[in-house]
Amino acid sequence: MTSPDYSPVTETCGEWVTPEALSMVYTRYRFAAECCRGRRVLEVACGPGVGLGYLGRQAGAIVGGDLTESLLRQAHRTVQGATPLVRFRAEALPLRAGSRDVIVCYEALYFFEDVDTFLKECRRVLAPQGQLILCTVNPEWPECNPSSYARRYYSARELSALLRQSGFTCELFGAFPAQPASWRAAWVARLKRAAVAWRLIPVTMAGKRLLKRLFFGALVPFPAVVIDGMAAYAQPVPIESAQPVRGYKVLFAVGRSA
């Protein structure tokens, strides 16, 4: 299976990140944990597997999968045999119809070749009343920095439409308010917008490290696994998609199958 290598744009253990980035990772998995309690879970695009153990402690059963082989090797070292791992494309999930109760997919939708097919596959694999939990950067956030690896980013309105067209009901949530909290934050925001506009932000995680230190100061190490209390939890809040959503950095969508 030939495919792009997404490891350069994936946060992995030992990388240095901002405290807010760590909070984003923790928020993703804590947001989903209650939905996974006692249920059959699949994480699509699990990367190095940092959240599989966290969700697995709640789930009745869990499977993780990714397209990038090097990330799956890291995931194998992370879970140490506790979680089944499979290499697959998001558009061809190797599971039986109705075999999962929850599918989680975080910060990966914009990389997929065919999002419509991915959502149809999720619909097929989910049991009745199953849940699909998505998290993605908000492209309507003025400081959104598009990845050169990305195919397309989806706004709140587009996420809602995609899910409904695939047979899901949809709830939308925003997290991490975008308004600057201080004069320094406002100054950093202006610098970042200029850097994004002039395409000055490096593509890889390693290349972004220096800019992170310049813009945000002290960094923290990215962990091998998600644990309770590792960072601040930013409770996602319900939002509507009728108007552009510029006030949040991150979008969550919860789709429910009939």
Image: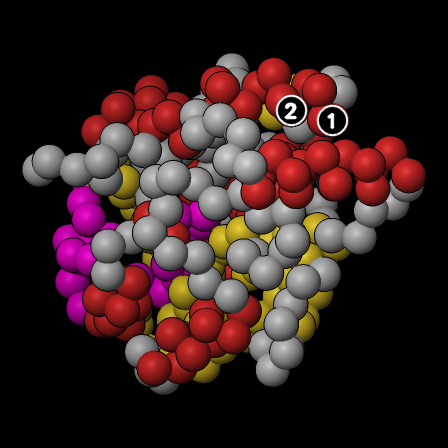
Dot 1: few (<14), some (14–19), or many (≥20) neighbours within 10 Å? some
Q: Residue furthest front?
A: 198
Q: Position of residue 222 (x, y in %)?
A: 56, 23
Q: Residue at x 34, y 82 (%)?
A: 165
Label disc, if present, on residue 216 of the rendered structure = 1
Looking at numbered disc 1 in the image, what kind of residue is underneath it? Phe
Q: How is the image coloured?
A: secondary structure
Secondary element under disc 2, as helix, strand or loop, is: helix
On the image, numbered disc 2 is attached to which residue?
212
Asked if residue 180 lies in the magenta stretch, the reply is: no
Picture coordinates of residue 61, whole percent (x, y): 35, 50
Q: Are marks 1 and 2 in contact (CB under 8 Å)?
A: yes
Give coordinates of residue 105: x percent, y percent: 40, 53
Task: Please give the range of residues in magenta.
Answer: 88-108
Give, as a three-letter code, the residue at label 2: Lys
**Of residues 100 and 4, the one drawn nearer to the viewer in this rendering:** 4
Prevalent SS, magenta region: loop
